[in-house]
Image (spheres, helix red, strand yellow):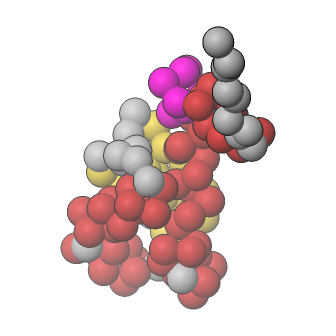
């Protein structure tokens, strides 16, 4: 009986190892934070302070009251876009802090 092994990349093996482990959620949360400037663009990213995820909520410090108001109106669309960019349902909500 011949056993065939499929060659797999280290990336595939790591992804398989991480998927479903306690490492997956923290890594996805970091990915969402890193995706913020890409999804929102450089101008908005420059007006943003500290960003972190706690219990599925993205906490974003915004330096402009006007921008905070605009982002508040579209926060659920932003949740959808950030989750799509991350490839997983990481966020439930966004809280904009001043």
Q: Residue furthest front?
A: 1
Give the image location of residue 40, x and y in percent: 48, 77
- In this view of the protein, which residue sits in the foreground, 42 or 95? 42
Q: Residue furthest right?
A: 10
Quarter assignment of residue 48: bottom right
- In this view of the protein, which residue sits in the foreground, 35 or 85? 85
Question: What main secondary structure does the magenta stretch of the protein show?
Answer: loop
Quarter assignment of residue 33: bottom right
Quarter assignment of residue 38: bottom right
State which quarter of the image contains the C terminus.
Answer: bottom left
> Image point 73% across, 38% down: which residue?
7
The reply to whether the magenta stretch includes residue 5 is: no
Give left or right: position of 91 versus 23: left
**Above or below, comparing residue 31 to residue 76 in the picture:** above
Give left or right: position of 69 versus 62: left
**Above or below, comparing residue 94 to residue 44 in the picture:** above
State which quarter of the image contains the N terminus.
Answer: top right
- In this view of the protein, which residue sits in the foreground, 54 or 23? 23
- Count of numbered badges drawn on the protein: 0
Q: Residue furthest top?
A: 1
**Above or below, comparing residue 11 to residue 98 in the picture:** above
Q: Residue furthest bottom?
A: 43
Give the image location of residue 47, x and y in percent: 57, 78
Is residue 17 among what the camera can see? yes
Give the image location of residue 66, x and y in percent: 37, 83
> Image point 40% across, 80% down: which residue?
67
Is residue 75 among what the camera can see? no
Give left or right: position of 57 versus 52: left
> Image point 67% across, 27% down: which residue?
4
Q: Which residues are magenta?
A: 19-25
């Amino acid at each position: 009986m011949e056993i065939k092994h499929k060659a797999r990349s280290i990336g595939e093996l790591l992804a398989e190892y991480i998927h479903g482990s306690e490492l997956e959620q923290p890594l996805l949360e970091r990915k969402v934070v890193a995706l913020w400037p890409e999804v929102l663009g450089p101008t908005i990213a420059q007006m943003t302070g500290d960003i972190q995820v706690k219990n599925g909520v993205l906490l974003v410090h915004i330096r402009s009251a006007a921008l905070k108001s605009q982002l508040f109106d579209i926060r659920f669309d932003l949740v959808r876009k950030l989750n799509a960019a991350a490839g997983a349902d990481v966020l439930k909500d966004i809280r904009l802090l001043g």
